[in-house]
Amino acid sequence: MRVHVDQRDPPTLVAAAWRERRLQYHNHYCEDAKYQGFAPLIAAFDWNSLAVVPILHQDSLWGLLCVASAEREYFDNTLLSALARTAKMLGYGLDELALKNRIEAEREEQSWRAEHDLLTELPNRAAYLAELPKTLERNAERLVAVGMMDLDDFKPVNDTYGHPAGDLVLQVVARRLRAAVRQGDLVARFGGDEFALLLGNLGSMDDLERILQRVQEAVRERITLTDGTLVQIDSSLGVTLYPLDEAPGEILLRHADQALYAAKSQKSTRERSVSLYDGIDDAALSPNSPVAEIPPDQSGTPSAAGACSVNSNAAEFKQ
């Protein structure tokens, strides 16, 4: 049923309660000559007595509590007081629910902020460290790459074009990195121009090579600033591999950082921008190593092929 709450003259009890925000009632509604224009509606619902009580939520009109009866003289002071209390309790309940929802939303927001970088919306260091042991446990018989990455030539962009331009570059790089890795991989920002990668379920070094190639191409792609200026940056990346590197989680991250330092220190002469942690024993990459015999992936690639990829590509990383 739809009842108008506009400026009709005379207004219905519903309209009066809506506009005046106070209880309205009538014990001879159908017999009052003022409301004969509503006679068909009143007759259809067999209304003789009608009470309408506003429901307020956070000091604003939220709705109306309407009670009708076929009896005449149905509403007395006791019943009207009860209806007023009921409407007030409904309003209090709505306020309580809104407060509960707001507290829950704030709690979720705080939880999200505790685990994410606000500028790029990537997971932060705390979230990365929380996920690292879970990824290692899930990939006990697969390779896991722990990577640390710095952006090369980012500081000149920040210094030349200002911090807003630098923030834009970081946001663009973050979006591209998310798109470059696979679903289930983790990209995090640790601060400044420092990012971290966590790549699990790697069947071979070929898998890692393909992902890192996409990552590097994503970073190198030119970025358009808000004024139309095109800038281009590069990256340095240090990687260690579990279980070839059997260190605990935070130590793996430290090893990746050491490999990153090696990549950056050789920037002027290096052929690759990716450096593998040199603490990994070369013997672990030999064809006879049990670690190199990685189980086939879901596509059915034989173990021997995976082992071959580990050896050939790992040698390239270590050069």
Image: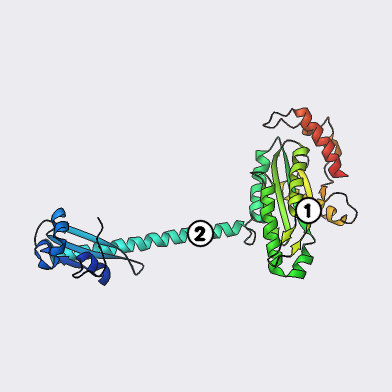
Q: Quadrant of residue 280?
A: top right
Q: Is 275 positioned to the left or the right of 20 in the image?
A: right
Identity of the residue drawn at 41% across and 62% down: 99
Residue 37 can be seen in this image: yes
The amino acid beneath tag 1 is Asp
Q: How many marks?
A: 2
Residue toward you, 107 or 120? 120
Residue 43 percent location from the top left of the image: 13, 56
- In the picture of the structure, the residue carrying the numbered disc 2 is 107
Q: Is residue 115 above or below residue 228?
A: above
Q: Which disc, if any, is residue 219?
A: none
Colouring used for the render: rainbow
* Lower sequence index among marks 2 and 1: 2
Label 2 CA crowd tier, 10 Å (few <14, some 14–19, many 20+) = few
Q: Quadrant of the C terminus?
A: top right
Q: Which disc, if any, is residue 257?
A: 1
Q: Is residue 244 above or below residue 44?
A: above
Residue toward you, 114 or 273? 273
Q: Secondary structure at mark 2?
A: helix
Q: Secondary structure at mark 1?
A: helix
Q: Quadrant of residue 67?
A: bottom left
Residue 281 can be seen in this image: no
